[in-house]
Image (cartoon, rainbow, N blue to C red):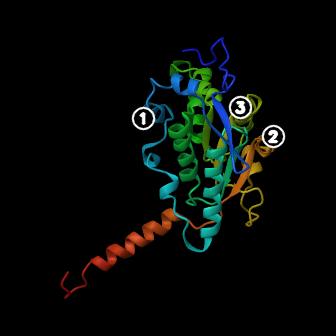
């Protein structure tokens, strides 16, 4: 079915969303015409199309833990992501989730995608930036069977995408040019982009590279325009879990002479 029928929907004007106001707060909900267009596509099918890795399929706001001494910062980041879902598509500005490894950035980004898919029938896509760049480089080989345009088309056209682990690839002019093309096209087309990165704008360790040094000044400048910055200051949750599991298992292992 055509995404934009010739006859405008009288309720939403073919935007796919209608606005409602309660207690002075404006929210957007899917229009009936959008529901009709997606009626043949199940939520499971949309999730599959989103290409969320198996490891993150269960990520949701309900199982995102705000823990330890950074509980407030984590709870605030979760609140910002939830508000993004509630207000979408009132603003085309995405989220730049910035913080150390293991802080929960990808969890929040995937939770946001899953809610957009389930609650608002939004076409979403999860994109591991390093994997995308490797695949694009592979297209340089004429025997690869895949063109650069074919690889980039869903990244450029999906309504909302996650660019996960931005800056993980060593900087080069080609990396900057490729990333600049992606973010500029999405910015010009007013498509929301969620970004996760381990690199900071002003790292406390001056020996550590900044995000600008990893992706180039053009891309970083564009991200300032197209995303709300969400700083997540937290310990490495994965390391803490592994440490806790190790101690738990150690407690269960009987010492010599003890009864297990």
Q: Is residue 101 above or below residue 41?
A: below
In the rendered structure, which disc, 1 or 3, sits on the residue that comes first in sequence?
A: 1
Kindly identify which residue carries mark 3: 186
Q: Is residue 151 visible?
A: no
Disc 1, SS = helix
Label for residue 52?
A: none
What's the CA distance linking mark 1 and mark 2?
37 Å
Q: Is residue 197 above or below residue 126?
A: below
Nearest the viewer among 187 and 139 is 187
Quadrant of the image occupied by residue 8: top right
Q: Position of residue 241 (x, y in %)?
A: 45, 67
| 1 vs 2, front mark | 1
Instruction: Tell me which residue sits at (77%, 49%) in the image.
Output: 212
| Quadrant including the C terminus | bottom left
| 1 vs 3, front mark | 1
Kindly identify which residue carries mark 2: 218
Q: Is residue 203 above or below residue 178?
A: below
- Numbered circles on residues, count: 3
Neighbour tally class for label 1: few under 14, some 14-19, many 20 plus, Cα within 10 Å: few
Instruction: Tell me which residue sits at (56%, 36%) in the image.
Output: 120
Instruction: Tell me which residue sits at (18%, 84%) in the image.
Output: 259
| Quadrant including the N terminus | top right
Nearest the viewer among 65 and 140 is 65
Asked if marks 2 and 3 touch (Cβ < 8 Å), the reply is no
Kindly identify which residue carries mark 1: 44
In the rendered structure, which disc, 2 or 3, sits on the residue that comes first in sequence?
A: 3
Quadrant of the image occupied by residue 215: top right
Q: Position of residue 169 (x, y in %)?
A: 64, 45
Q: Residue furthest bottom?
A: 257
Neighbour tally class for label 3: few under 14, some 14-19, many 20 plus, Cα within 10 Å: many
């Amino acid at each position: 079915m055509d995404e934009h029928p010739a006859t405008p929907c009288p309720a939403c004007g073919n935007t796919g969303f209608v606005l409602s106001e309660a207690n002075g707060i404006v929210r957007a909900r899917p229009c009936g015409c959008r529901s009709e267009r997606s009626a043949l596509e199940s939520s499971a099918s949309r999730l599959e199309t989103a290409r969320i890795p198996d490891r993150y399929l269960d990520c949701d706001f309900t199982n995102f833990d705000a823990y330890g001494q950074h509980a407030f910062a984590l709870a605030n980041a979760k609140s910002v992501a939830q508000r993004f879902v509630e207000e979408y598509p009132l603003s085309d500005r995405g989220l730049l989730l910035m913080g150390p490894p293991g802080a929960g950035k990808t969890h929040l980004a995937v939770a946001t995608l899953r809610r957009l898919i389930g609650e608002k029938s939004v076409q979403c896509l999860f994109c591991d930036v390093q994997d995308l760049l490797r695949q694009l480089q592979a297209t340089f080989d004429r025997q690869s069977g895949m063109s650069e345009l074919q690889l980039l088309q869903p990244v450029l056209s999906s309504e909302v995408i996650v660019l996960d682990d931005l800056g993980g690839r060593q900087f080069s002019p080609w990396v900057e040019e490729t990333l600049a093309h992606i973010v500029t096209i999405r910015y010009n087309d007013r498509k929301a982009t969620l970004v996760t990165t381990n690199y900071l704008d002003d790292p406390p360790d001056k020996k550590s590279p900044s995000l600008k040094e990893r992706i180039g000044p053009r891309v970083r400048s564009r991200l300032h325009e197209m995303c709300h910055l969400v700083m997540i200051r937290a310990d490495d949750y994965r390391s803490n879990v592994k440490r806790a599991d190790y101690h738990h298992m150690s407690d269960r292992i009987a010492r010599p002479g003890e009864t297990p």
